Amino acid sequence: MLVTESLASLVASRLRDIPDFPERGVVFKDFTPLLADHDALAAVVEDVVARFRGDVDVVVGIEARGFMIGAATAYALGVGFVPVRKAGKLPAATESANYALEYGHATIEIHSDAFTSGTRVLVMDDVLATGGTAAATCDLVERLGGVVAGVDVVVEIAALGGREALGARPLHALLQV
Protein backbone atom coordinates (compact mmCIF):
# COMPACT_ATOMS: atom_id res chain seq x y z
CA MET A 1 0.00 0.00 0.00
CA LEU A 2 1.30 3.49 -0.83
CA VAL A 3 2.05 5.89 2.00
CA THR A 4 -0.76 8.22 0.84
CA GLU A 5 -3.20 5.30 0.80
CA SER A 6 -2.26 4.30 4.32
CA LEU A 7 -2.55 7.92 5.49
CA ALA A 8 -5.97 8.18 3.84
CA SER A 9 -7.00 4.98 5.63
CA LEU A 10 -5.76 6.38 8.92
CA VAL A 11 -7.70 9.62 8.37
CA ALA A 12 -10.85 7.69 7.41
CA SER A 13 -10.60 5.63 10.58
CA ARG A 14 -10.46 8.82 12.68
CA LEU A 15 -13.55 10.51 11.19
CA ARG A 16 -17.10 10.22 12.38
CA ASP A 17 -20.32 11.20 10.66
CA ILE A 18 -22.77 13.32 12.62
CA PRO A 19 -26.17 13.21 10.90
CA ASP A 20 -28.40 16.28 10.83
CA PHE A 21 -25.70 18.70 12.00
CA PRO A 22 -25.64 21.67 11.87
CA GLU A 23 -29.09 21.24 10.41
CA ARG A 24 -31.39 18.48 9.20
CA GLY A 25 -30.19 16.71 6.06
CA VAL A 26 -26.50 17.59 6.48
CA VAL A 27 -24.04 14.84 7.42
CA PHE A 28 -21.22 16.58 9.27
CA LYS A 29 -17.72 15.09 8.91
CA ASP A 30 -16.23 15.41 12.39
CA PHE A 31 -12.46 15.17 12.54
CA THR A 32 -12.04 15.84 16.26
CA PRO A 33 -11.18 12.14 16.85
CA LEU A 34 -8.22 12.67 14.49
CA LEU A 35 -7.12 15.70 16.54
CA ALA A 36 -7.31 13.63 19.74
CA ASP A 37 -4.97 10.98 18.30
CA HIS A 38 -1.41 12.32 18.49
CA ASP A 39 -0.05 9.86 15.93
CA ALA A 40 -2.80 10.58 13.40
CA LEU A 41 -2.49 14.35 13.85
CA ALA A 42 1.29 14.17 13.53
CA ALA A 43 1.02 12.07 10.36
CA VAL A 44 -1.36 14.59 8.75
CA VAL A 45 0.83 17.56 9.67
CA GLU A 46 4.00 15.78 8.51
CA ASP A 47 2.34 15.00 5.16
CA VAL A 48 1.50 18.67 4.57
CA VAL A 49 4.94 19.82 5.72
CA ALA A 50 6.63 17.40 3.31
CA ARG A 51 4.73 18.92 0.40
CA PHE A 52 5.07 22.62 1.32
CA ARG A 53 8.34 23.10 3.26
CA GLY A 54 10.13 26.11 1.77
CA ASP A 55 7.24 26.93 -0.56
CA VAL A 56 4.99 28.97 1.76
CA ASP A 57 5.46 32.03 3.92
CA VAL A 58 2.27 31.77 5.97
CA VAL A 59 -0.59 29.37 6.64
CA VAL A 60 -4.15 30.69 6.57
CA GLY A 61 -6.62 28.61 8.60
CA ILE A 62 -10.36 28.82 8.07
CA GLU A 63 -12.56 29.09 11.18
CA ALA A 64 -12.79 27.04 13.19
CA ARG A 65 -11.41 23.60 12.48
CA GLY A 66 -8.92 25.01 9.97
CA PHE A 67 -7.36 26.86 12.92
CA MET A 68 -6.45 23.59 14.57
CA ILE A 69 -4.78 21.87 11.66
CA GLY A 70 -3.46 25.11 10.19
CA ALA A 71 -1.76 26.33 13.36
CA ALA A 72 -0.09 22.96 13.93
CA THR A 73 1.13 22.95 10.33
CA ALA A 74 2.38 26.55 10.49
CA TYR A 75 4.34 25.70 13.63
CA ALA A 76 5.88 22.62 11.99
CA LEU A 77 6.74 24.63 8.85
CA GLY A 78 8.29 27.43 10.90
CA VAL A 79 5.99 30.07 9.38
CA GLY A 80 3.25 32.32 10.71
CA PHE A 81 -0.44 31.60 10.99
CA VAL A 82 -3.31 33.89 9.91
CA PRO A 83 -6.92 33.18 10.89
CA VAL A 84 -9.89 33.70 8.60
CA ARG A 85 -12.92 34.23 10.83
CA LYS A 86 -16.65 34.72 10.71
CA ALA A 87 -17.73 38.35 10.37
CA GLY A 88 -17.25 40.53 13.43
CA LYS A 89 -14.71 38.32 15.23
CA LEU A 90 -11.45 40.07 14.26
CA PRO A 91 -10.51 43.23 16.18
CA ALA A 92 -8.60 45.28 13.56
CA ALA A 93 -9.46 46.50 10.05
CA THR A 94 -10.63 43.63 7.83
CA GLU A 95 -11.46 42.60 4.30
CA SER A 96 -14.59 40.47 3.95
CA ALA A 97 -16.15 38.06 1.48
CA ASN A 98 -19.64 36.57 1.27
CA TYR A 99 -20.15 32.99 0.15
CA ALA A 100 -22.67 30.17 -0.04
CA LEU A 101 -22.58 27.09 2.16
CA GLU A 102 -24.33 23.79 1.48
CA TYR A 103 -26.85 24.94 4.12
CA GLY A 104 -26.93 28.76 3.88
CA HIS A 105 -24.81 31.88 3.39
CA ALA A 106 -22.05 33.43 5.47
CA THR A 107 -19.37 36.12 5.56
CA ILE A 108 -15.71 35.64 6.45
CA GLU A 109 -13.03 38.18 7.22
CA ILE A 110 -9.26 38.49 7.34
CA HIS A 111 -7.17 41.28 8.84
CA SER A 112 -6.29 43.78 6.11
CA ASP A 113 -2.64 43.77 7.20
CA ALA A 114 -2.32 39.98 7.56
CA PHE A 115 0.59 39.78 5.11
CA THR A 116 2.36 41.74 2.40
CA SER A 117 1.93 41.54 -1.35
CA GLY A 118 3.60 38.47 -2.87
CA THR A 119 3.32 36.38 0.30
CA ARG A 120 3.02 32.68 -0.55
CA VAL A 121 -0.02 31.35 1.30
CA LEU A 122 -1.18 27.85 2.15
CA VAL A 123 -4.94 27.79 2.86
CA MET A 124 -6.04 25.02 5.23
CA ASP A 125 -9.34 23.60 6.45
CA ASP A 126 -10.69 20.29 7.65
CA VAL A 127 -13.31 19.59 4.97
CA LEU A 128 -13.94 20.81 1.44
CA ALA A 129 -17.65 20.51 0.67
CA THR A 130 -19.17 22.97 -1.85
CA GLY A 131 -15.96 24.99 -1.89
CA GLY A 132 -17.62 28.30 -1.02
CA THR A 133 -15.60 28.96 2.12
CA ALA A 134 -12.28 27.92 0.56
CA ALA A 135 -12.91 29.95 -2.62
CA ALA A 136 -13.90 33.02 -0.59
CA THR A 137 -10.75 32.62 1.51
CA CYS A 138 -8.58 32.38 -1.61
CA ASP A 139 -10.29 35.48 -3.00
CA LEU A 140 -9.46 37.36 0.23
CA VAL A 141 -5.83 36.19 0.12
CA GLU A 142 -5.50 37.33 -3.49
CA ARG A 143 -7.29 40.63 -2.80
CA LEU A 144 -4.59 41.37 -0.20
CA GLY A 145 -1.87 40.57 -2.75
CA GLY A 146 -1.07 37.08 -1.51
CA VAL A 147 -0.34 34.16 -3.80
CA VAL A 148 -2.27 30.96 -3.06
CA ALA A 149 0.44 28.30 -3.07
CA GLY A 150 -2.15 25.63 -2.33
CA VAL A 151 -5.36 24.68 -0.62
CA ASP A 152 -4.99 21.71 1.70
CA VAL A 153 -7.87 19.88 3.36
CA VAL A 154 -8.13 16.70 5.36
CA VAL A 155 -11.34 15.51 3.65
CA GLU A 156 -12.99 16.37 0.34
CA ILE A 157 -16.66 15.50 -0.14
CA ALA A 158 -16.27 14.99 -3.89
CA ALA A 159 -19.99 14.78 -4.73
CA LEU A 160 -20.50 18.40 -3.61
CA GLY A 161 -18.16 19.77 -6.30
CA GLY A 162 -16.00 22.02 -4.15
CA ARG A 163 -12.93 21.41 -6.30
CA GLU A 164 -14.59 23.26 -9.19
CA ALA A 165 -15.21 26.34 -7.02
CA LEU A 166 -11.44 26.73 -6.59
CA GLY A 167 -10.74 26.96 -10.31
CA ALA A 168 -7.08 26.39 -11.16
CA ARG A 169 -5.83 26.83 -7.59
CA PRO A 170 -3.89 23.76 -6.45
CA LEU A 171 -5.88 21.54 -4.08
CA HIS A 172 -4.80 18.54 -2.06
CA ALA A 173 -7.16 16.39 -0.01
CA LEU A 174 -5.85 13.53 2.11
CA LEU A 175 -9.12 11.67 1.73
CA GLN A 176 -11.98 11.90 -0.76
CA VAL A 177 -15.36 10.62 0.31
Image (cartoon, helix red, strand yellow):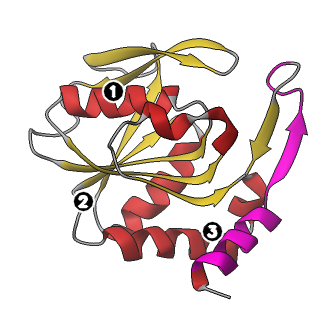
Q: Nearer the viewer, mark 3 or mark 2?
A: 2
Q: Outermost residue toward the left?
A: 117
Which residues make up the magenta segment? 4-23
Would residue 100 appear left or right of 140 to someone viewing this image?
right
Q: Secondary structure at mark 1?
A: strand
Real-space Cα separation, disc 1 to disc 2, in angstroms? 18 Å
Amino acid type for the residue under numbered disc 1:
Ile
Asked if the residue at tag 3 contacts the one at tag 1, i.e. Cβ–Cβ closer than 8 Å, the answer is no
Query: Upstream in the sequence, badge 1 or badge 3?
Result: 3
Q: Secondary structure at mark 3?
A: helix
In the picture of the structure, the residue carrying the numbered disc 1 is 110
Asked if the residue at tag 2 contacts the one at tag 1, i.e. Cβ–Cβ closer than 8 Å, the answer is no
Asked if the residue at tag 2 contacts the one at tag 3, i.e. Cβ–Cβ closer than 8 Å, the answer is no
Name which residue lies at 21% across and 57% down.
57
When asked about the image quadrant of residue 36, the answer is bottom right
Q: Is residue 20 magenta?
A: yes
Name which residue lies at 72% across and 62% down.
34
The foreground one among 56 and 165 is 165
Up the image or down, 152 lies above or below 97; here it is below
Amino acid type for the residue under numbered disc 2:
Val
Query: Upstream in the sequence, badge 3 or badge 2?
Result: 3
Residue 176, image x, y percentages: 66, 55
Amino acid type for the residue under numbered disc 3:
Leu
Disc sitting over residue 29 in the figure = none
In the picture of the structure, the residue carrying the numbered disc 3 is 41
Q: Outermost residue toward the bottom?
A: 1
Q: Nearer the viewer, mark 1 or mark 2?
A: 2
When asked about the image quadrant of residue 169, the answer is top left
Disc sitting over residue 56 in the figure = 2
